[in-house]
Amino acid sequence: MKTLKKVLFWTLVAFAIIQFIPIDRVNKPVDTAVNFVDAKKTPEKIKGLIKGACYDCHSNETVYPKYAYFAPISWSVKSHINEGREHLNFSVWGTYNKELKESMLSKSIQTIQNKAMPMPGYIVYHKEANLSDAERTLLVQYFEEMLKSKTY
């Protein structure tokens, strides 16, 4: 019993200490001239879908949930956001070259159709990101039209 109390005590101490490891949650300023939904004058319905389902991980407009302020969960959340921004950052869309935009749109279409995005684990805690089949179709059609008309 003494050993269990010691393990519990030191586990709690370690948990308390790791709370002091800082995580950068400051979003970079967004320039509307290069931000996807602004620069593309995205229709309101599509804009709402993209912002609700994609922007937390794929833009500089992340809204961190309360659970993202507790280590070690905060480390995982920040890692997912960093990875998401590496693959696609809507906030800097206008800075991407033509080939990169085409590739990102094509990959976005694929991941939306395959229901790989938004990530199922994200949807559990963010119901607004749980896109219906009709909403997924709208996004896919919007991105496909951009590719077809080369208006990206």
Image: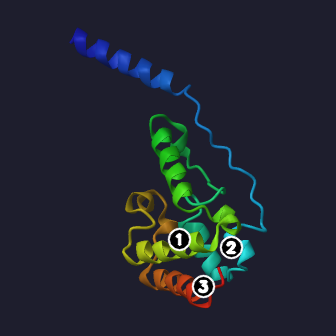
Using a 10 Å C-alpha cutoff, classify the residue at mark 2 as few (fewer than 14 neighbours), some (14 to 19) or many (20 or more): many
Task: Please tell me which residue is depicted at 56% across the width and 84% down the height of the picture.
Answer: 147
In depth, the one of 129 and 35 nearer the eye is 35
Name the residue rendered at 47%, 78% in the picture: 109
> 144 or 43: which is nearer to us?
144
> SS for tag 1?
helix
Tell me how far mark 2 sits from mark 1, CA to CA.
15 Å
| Front position among marks 2 and 3 | 3
Instruction: Identify the image quadrant of the N terminus.
Output: top left
Look at label 2 and name its amino acid.
Answer: Val
Please give left or right for residue 147 compared with residue 95 in the image: left
Front position among marks 2 and 1? 1
What type is the residue that disc 1 sits on?
A: Met
Q: Residues within 10 Å of mark 3 (few under 14, many from 20)?
A: some
Give the image quarter of residue 45: bottom right
Residues at marks 2 and 3, CA–CA distance in whole angstroms: 13 Å
Q: Could you say whether the residue bearing mark 2 is in a helix, strand or loop?
A: helix
The percent coordinates of residue 5 (x first, y second) are 29, 14
Look at the numbered discs 1 and 3 and tell me whether their residues touch, using CB distance below 8 Å.
no
Residue 104 badge:
1
Q: Are marks 2 and 3 in contact (CB under 8 Å)?
A: no
Residue highlighted by disc 2: 37
**Mark 1 or mark 3: whose residue is earlier in sequence:** 1
